[in-house]
Image: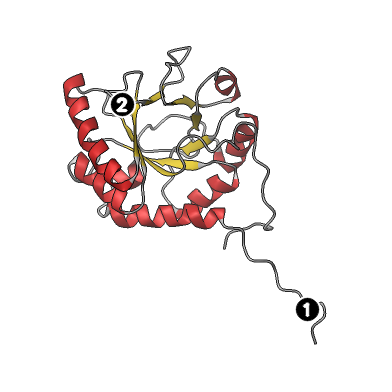
Amino acid sequence: MRAGTGTPRPAPAGQASGRGPRGVVLLTDRRVARRPLVGAVAAAVAGGVRWVVLREKDLPRAERLALAVALRAVLTDAGGTLIVAGPDPLDGDAVHLPAAGPYPPPRLGLVGRSCHDAAELARLTTEDYATLSPVHLTRTKPGYGPPLGPDGLRELVQVSPVPVLALGGIETPDQVTACVDAGATGVAVLGALMRATDPTDTATTLTSAFHDALTPPPPTATTRGTQ
């Protein structure tokens, strides 16, 4: 059962605008996907994913562009959005940048940035959102850390000037709930969806956990005035 009092949590600085990804955000990695990448993404979208970050940065631009075109078609049909990792939007209008740069960020419709600590958050200028990682240890990038955990995530969310996605080792509904309780507006997931034998079922489970975590628990029944 989700812990909570039912009292709305005040939004940290920059989090009230609602701009940027929300919910379960899929990060692609064709090398670990159990099916062809476009099919894996389509299956996750069928399970409720509406935001996808195209990585695959080792591919030539022409191949990445072809993937971007195919993934945008999948997402457009569902009302979703494709974000491209790196400064090249691949003929789109949304990018996710590494912590190292470029600075200042390009002027596009949507810009995110990878962050890992308060110093990197403080460098943000016109970005629309940030990821904070690693929340947990992850098989995708072993050795990165130490993990923030829910408490460390909460501390950084409170000082972030923009909405935050939790990233790193998030695989279970309980982990999704903990990230939302810490103030994240969404969770960025790679391995749990790319490695899933049934990405639709996994996406449905994680997306449901996100929406459930946003719903305040019902008020506790009292016996006042009752016999």
Report the amino acid beneath label 2. Gly
Q: Quadrant of the C terminus?
A: bottom right
Mark 1 — residue? 223
Circle nearer the viewer, 1 or 2: 2
In the current view of this chain or complex, which residue is farthest to the right? 225
Q: Is residue 28 left or right of residue 39?
A: right
Q: What colour scheme has been applied to the protein in the rendered image?
A: secondary structure
Q: Which residue is mark 2?
A: 92
- Assign a secondary structure to mark 1: loop
Q: What residue is shown at x 70% (from left), y 69% (from top)?
A: 220
Mark 1 vs 2: CB contact within 8 A: no
Residue 60 visible: no
Q: Residue at x 32, y 22 (%)?
A: 89
Can residue 78 be seen in the rendering of this structure?
A: yes
Q: Amino acid at mark 1?
A: Thr
Question: Split into 4 quadrants, where in the image is the N terminus?
Answer: bottom right
Q: Residue at x 79, y 83 (%)?
A: 226
- Percent position (x, y) of residue 173? 46, 54
- Residue 62 or 146: which is nearer the viewer? 62
Q: Secondary structure at mark 2?
A: loop
Q: Mark 2 or mark 1, which is nearer the start of the sequence? A: 2
Q: Position of residue 2 (x, y in %)?
A: 58, 59
- Tell me how many marks there are: 2
Locate residue 211, reporting x and y percent: 49, 54
Q: Nearest the camera: 94 or 98? A: 94
